[in-house]
Image: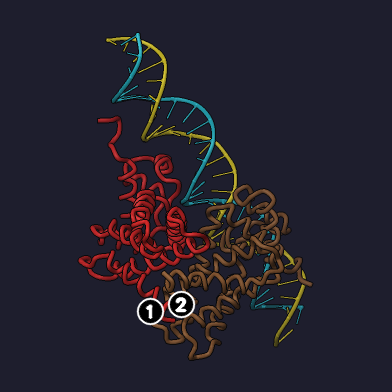
Chain colours: A red, B brown, C yellow, D cyan
Amino acid sequence: MGRWEPDAGGRLARAALELYAERGYEQTTVAEIAQRAGVTERTFFRHFADKREVLFGASDEVYEVLASAVGAAPPAAPPLRALTAGLVALAGLCAERHEHARQRQAVIVANASLRERELIKLAAMASGLADALRRRGVADPTATLAAEAGIAAFRVGFEQWLAGPAEVDPAQVVREALDKLGGVFAGG
Amino acid sequence: MGRWEPDAGGRLARAALELYAERGYEQTTVAEIAQRAGVTERTFFRHFADKREVLFGASDEVYEVLASAVGAAPPAAPPLRALTAGLVALAGLCAERHEHARQRQAVIVANASLRERELIKLAAMASGLADALRRRGVADPTATLAAEAGIAAFRVGFEQWLAGPAEVDPAQVVREALDKLGGVFAGG
DNA sequence: GCGACTGATGTCAGCGAGTGTCATCAACGT
DNA sequence: ACGTTGATGACACTCGCTGACATCAGTCGC
């Protein structure tokens, strides 16, 4: 065993989510989070770039899943098919964590600066998705547009899934959102 | 004439854009902006909620133009037609200000927290756009999806317009972006 | 074993964003 | 003239965040 309790980052992330949920993001100070995690304020900022980032640490894993699922689609598959594969894989990541995702989302939507941070994470996802489509030979601006629209559909589907019961398959809800979006442009 | 020079807010907004462009957003302090505008730091925060908001003051006007153009489309027009009308009207607002828009955009893309703020403004536009579509009888989640995708297309078109010569009509570029996006879902 | 090194943490000083509060004083209405 | 209003100044304060240096268990080379 080390000089300190292990997993300081994990303790900080859990303490932060708890406190943000209990009393709100703005009413929570970094000093309080650090105290609950048993470290100093300075250590918080060694693990997370800022007070918001503590809720978004898992983003990196997400980019990889998205890109590899898009790349794994059959080479002859049209862009929409590859896009769907990526977003369905993304949805799969959350399937087992309905309650955690719901609590986290409740904290985020309750605060404007957390919503800002979420939006830039989604934009980064869209950017990575567009990259993955370009690697499949989809040209710009089509790749960018498809990625942006796809992420929008994902977001809408994800919110629907959060609002519903835990048994529902998030991947299926995301598929349906993409279908609906297709209807806007195809059916008029 | 009042006790002070008039239009303190305008002077602050101009001073801020100048300084952000000259030396970067993070290297500029609010005290410096206030000094260049001839007021105190406290006065800056009476005119703008924070250091970022000084670049986004015109947003309110934007929401109104968007909503009224969507509402003004013929009642029988399909959602895509109404959506296009709104985004084209929005593009028209910028037509005369190519250089100003370009400088402002350069400042924004150079800084992550300014990009965050821009994204939440765009999300607010999408939300208002979805409202306007719902008032036309478009049901959710179609209204939300169409609005999100439409804003994505607007953004892509707007960036293309900024990158090109000032004579190009931004409305036309936005139209083309929407067409391309339609191709993803229609043509496969 | 012993010393050098590493790496995560603590400690402290400090800057800058943003807020609450009260004072000031031209303009305006009565 | 007199009270009111509204924009501003002045000042103290909290909190997010950073840089610099100290500390010390574990580890590696010898």
Please name whichever residue, B7 or A8, is drawn nearer the observer in this view of the structure: A8
Where residue B21 sits: x, y (%)? 67, 53
- Asked if the residue under mark 2 is in contact with the one under mark 1, i.e. CB atoms within 8 Å, the reply is yes
Toward which corner of the image does residue A179 lie, by quadrant? bottom left
Quadrant position of the C terminus of chain A in the picture:
bottom left
Task: Report helix, strand or loop for mark 2.
Answer: helix
Identify whether A87 is placed above or below B85.
Answer: above
Q: Which residue is mark 2?
A: B130
Instruction: Point out the tag, 1 or 2, that comes first from the N-terminus.
Output: 2
Name the side, left or right, on which A132 lies relative to A159: right
Q: Chain of mark 1?
A: B
Under tag 1, what secondary structure? loop
Q: Residue at x 39, y 77 (%)?
A: A183
Q: Residues within 10 Å of mark 2 (few under 14, many from 20)?
A: many
Between residue A21 and residue A118, name the one nearer to us: A118
Is residue A121 visible in the rendered image? The answer is: no
In this rendered view, identify the residue nearer to me: A84 or A110: A84
Q: Nearer the viewer, residue B166 or A119?
A: B166
Q: Please determine whether, in this image, residue C5 is positioned above or below residue C22.
A: above
Residue ID at (42%, 87%): B137
Q: Is residue A32 above or below residue B150?
A: above
Q: Which mark is residue B140?
A: 1
State the image coordinates of residue B49 (x, y, percent, origin top left): 56, 63
Residue under the point 51% across and 82% down = B81
Quadrant containing the N terminus of chain A is top left
Name the kind of residue labelled 1 in the image.
Answer: Asp
The image quadrant of residue B50 is: bottom right
